[in-house]
Image: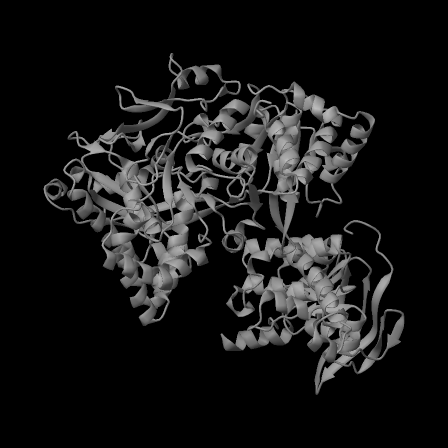
Amino acid sequence: MPAPDTFPRLLTAHSRERGDQPAIREKDLGIWQTHTWAGALAEVRSLAAGLHRLGLRRGETLAIVGDNRPRLYWAMDAAQALGAIPVPLYQDAVAEEMAYVLGNAEVRIAVVEDQEQVDKLLEVRGRCPALQLLIYDDPRGLRHYDRAVLRDYGDVQAAGRELERDQPGFFEAEVERGRSSDVAIMLYTSGTTGTPKGVMLTHDNLIVTARGGIERERLTDREEVMAYLPMAWVGDNLFSYAQGHVAGFCVSCPESADTVLTDMREIGPSYFFAPPRVLENLLTQVSIRMEDAARPKRWLYRRFMGVARRWGPAILEGKAVPLAARLTYGVGDLLIYGPLRNVLGFSRIRVAYTAGEAIGPDLFQFYRSLGVNLKQLYGSTETSVFVCIQPDGQVKPDSVGTPAKDVEVRVSSEGEVQVRSPGVFHGYHRAEVATREAKTADGFFRTGDAGFFDEDGHLKIIDRARDVGRLADGTLFAPKYLENKLKFFPFIKEAVAFGDRREFVTAFVCIDLLAVGNWAERRSLPYTGYTDLAGQAPVLDLVQGCVEEVNADLARDPRLAGSQIHRFLVLHKELDADDGELTRTRKVRRGFIAEKYAPLVQALYAGAPTVQVETQVRFEDGRTGLIRAQLAIREARTVGRASQRAA
Amino acid sequence: MRGEVPGPVLLELRGISLSFGGVHALREVEFRIHQGEVCAIIGPNGAGKSSLLNVINGVYAPDAGTIHFGGETRRSMRPHRAAEQGIARTFQNIALFKGMSVLDNVMTGRALKMKRGVAWQALYWGPAEREELQNREAVERIIDFLQIEHVRKTPVGRLPYGLQKRVELARALAAEPKLLLLDEPMAGMNIEEKQDMCRFILDANDELGVTVALIEHDMAVVMDIADRVVVLDYGRKIADGAPEAVRADPAVIAAYLGVATDADRRAIAEAS
């Protein structure tokens, strides 16, 4: 019998082969509730039949909105079983973004988690005439709503079971009609520019790619995985859903977004994915707690983290390390690294990936030095994630590794990275022009990233191709590279660098309220909130120190010495996706910010000592308010030849 | 409940007066709460709002008047009787066990539901364990309901103020009350926390069928969530009705904005 080649067939096969093994878990009322593969199939069958009764047909779309919940994952399975296309949406998206996606995908039926999502969709219903029906998981608060557009998830399943009684074999027949070349899912890209586009991925795209990753890391059906990243994001789709379906391992859904840390510790994942931001937050928390610890503990921590930095990565890679170092590291593991891994829920990790954005080398090495096999991965929605992975034993902090199985990678003459693989997407939904532009004539996907292969054949990504610029004197300017360097400081949450076609480089900085707030508290520095804290002179001094350290570091590389940061300011508000300043995956939208804060950029280059600013902010409920502030502009010390130009 | 016909009377106070020495906290107050409604009690500082709640759940014994609740008419309540009969409350100044976890604090709300004695509890196995499990499940439902899963095991003293208020509400709800008395549930909260709290109160009213009487100063909140508003001023009830009607009542406006008497005008003239 051939290997199952669609998700519903994989589900059916697992239910047969490992029916009583756990497939998915969720924490409910404080207790982990486990659903077996057989149980999951039963849920999916009745839901699929129920959806069919509600009129969901082959080729149509089904929107899915909410946190990671088994019932929402089953909705994906059910849609695919019917040959319909699930379209997961970012659950924290504001109404307009949802309206766009729902309209573009011509969604008629949506499966949503709770009242919050129902409210959001009802709000945009006027703009999405096609949207007819909302199926909700959690009935709380929905008692007085208009029943005409709402259905309870359980009721839909009950109706489905009736249909199954009347037409035995309905589910099997539907699954049989599916082809592996059918579109399995549609994911909307966050869109750093322009409107979101629906990326259509087929069963083949996802399953072949997932299988490649599983073989490379030797994953089994015994892995433990946390599904805590947005379902609308391709990463969760691949790591939790696709690889879970291919390998047959169990996926655990956290109780709520706020409990992920506790849940991680309880589950102890063995295969883990985290974008740099999550890893950064964890490190910030660890650093803060260590700062608050007693003096001997702080000493012990610093002492052994020094040892870890020196020897940890080499020991992890199985390289030759002197016996004395190995012994000291062993003591450190007993006293510090082991307990720390345990606190972070990393004790059982075999393979951990990070991707989505470049990760600071220090941040990256921190985890590796603790003995966590964290590796960088390069990919995008259009390539079903996997393009390059760092191979075990050959991990270089500043590269993303070698091409994954069956993936061809080349760098065009303009320096753009291009990819051809079984995972490369089918096309953008209703955007043939964009699809044609995204692919070359010979089927390579244009990633839009600038990069090159180093002497060992490892791919190095510097920035988005169109973001890489030049200073007025021709010096290379890679904004993201500078921003990442700044962001590694726990005090700095976001940075935006400017410099293309300018005389010198300047930057906006956003402080990390948690870290700087704690720092201020220990110095008895009173503050009322973000805006106040960000404007205080000692905080500016602190940030200046960070900027100057970055400059010193840049000065060491002749290629980058010219792009040292001459002036900066600390923004009066945090960058926010609701204000359009970040994408939903929390990437900085540099162009938008430069436009929105044009007077600030101007002031940075004009050399004014302060600048007045007034900004409209959008609250979560959609209302807006104004923030006013007077921002100080600081000059940062630069090193070497660059300093002359600043004068 | 909003916009529907009021249910049967759940609690009725008749001619309640209460004084501390020469201070008349409440004067002949007539007050009723209907089953299923959200009733707000408002009034300027010192109007007798908290005293009224304290009379209802028996902290104070009134000097005159009767209290009718649960089919009985009494001169005064006793706090433990009130609790047994299904009246739960929260306090203006948070009254939680700061050193205990959120979970343990909410468990204390179940004290009256636990029938096994100290000996059984100490032994733990058998009936006491079953009882503990049942009650823990009930508590977990409340924790889920109020979305405080992430702090389940955190000592209450370490939580921000807004969350502590929510934990206090959780403890009150854990007692499965018929009548819930909330003394300034939203004092000191920011807008977002207030919105959350409003939703939780409305949800408790809607989904759990709890009748709510609350004291609140934020008029926007009161107008939003109350079915009926009762206004007290100097211990007297000066208005009672639908929010819109009460807002337009001249007596209420006078109590809030103040009406200058001739004596005041003379005093101001002399001072200037």
In the rendered image, residue A451, in percent from the top left (x then y), is placed at 28, 29
Left or right side of B65 for A545: left
- Measuring 68% from the left and 34% from the top, which residue is drawn there? A44
Q: Is residue A596 visible?
A: no
Q: Residue furthest bottom?
A: B21
Quarter-of-image position of residue A468: top left
- Measuring 73% from the left and 24% from the top, which residue is drawn there? A55
Q: How many marks?
A: 0
Q: Is residue A114 visible?
A: yes
Q: Quadrant of the N terminus of chain A?
A: top right
- Measuring 22% from the left and 47% from the top, which residue is drawn there? A550
Q: Quadrant of the C terminus of chain A?
A: top left
- Measuring 40% from the left and 15% from the top, which residue is drawn there? A443
Quarter-of-image position of residue A161: top right
Left or right side of B168 for A496: left
In the rendered image, residue A463, in percent from the top left (x then y), is placed at 30, 33
Instruction: Give the image's coloring scheme.
Output: one colour
In the rendered image, residue A197, in percent from the top left (x then y), is placed at 49, 25
Figure check: A64 above or below A184: below
Residue closest to the eye, A629 or A137:
A137
In the rendered image, residue A13, in percent from the top left (x then y), is placed at 63, 31
Residue closest to the eye, A182 or A124:
A182
Left or right side of A102 for A283: left
